[in-house]
Amino acid sequence: MRLGVRVGKGCAGLLDRKMRNLSCEQLQFDEIWGFIGKKERHCNIDDAPEIGDVWTFCAIDPKTKLVPSFKVGKRDVVVLHLGPVTSPLLAVRAAIVEEFRNRESAEAE
């Protein structure tokens, strides 16, 4: 597991350095479901919190197929870093767009 964490941190650093000044004109948002260990409906209270359903939320440029931002985790407000959410996909869309705008404004300064 330590190797996976190291590789993940390296990839995150690489993406943070390389994904700058992108010419994305349009972004589409999607979510992909998977599970770790077993599906959520088979989880017990005693199971580790990492076990069960996992979601990958992605922003995709339809023209270039570039994925400038993504987030992996449970489908809850802790992962989304937002207040109460009625639609996780809409919340992720708002968070990704805000992050994209923050990067652009930080680079403009």
Image (cartoon, rainbow, N blue to C red):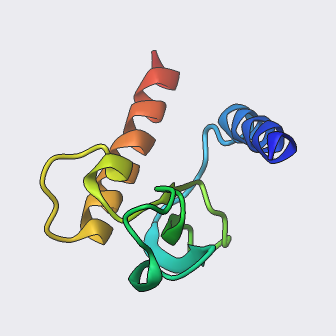
Q: Nearer the viewer, residue 3 or 8?
A: 3
- How many callouts does the rendering have? 0
Determine the image quadrant of residue 93.
Answer: bottom left
Residue furthest toward the front? Answer: 46
Determine the image quadrant of residue 99.
Answer: top left
Determine the image quadrant of residue 2.
Answer: top right
Is 85 placed above or below 101 here?
Answer: below
> Residue 103 at x, y = what percent?
47, 32
Horizontal side of residue 31 vs 92, given as left or right: right
Residue plotted at (15% across, 47% down): 83
> Residue 86 at x, y = what percent?
13, 68
Is 3 placed above or below 55 here?
Answer: above
Horizontal side of residue 101 vs 66, given as left or right: left
Q: Nearer the viewer, residue 95 or 87?
A: 87
Q: Nearer the viewer, residue 12 or 101?
A: 12
Task: For the C terminus, give its image quadrant.
Answer: top left
Is 11 placed above or below 109 here?
Answer: below
> Residue 24 at x, y = what percent?
54, 58
Q: Nearer the viewer, residue 104 or 51?
A: 51
Residue plotted at (67% across, 70% down): 64
Residue furthest toward the right? Answer: 3
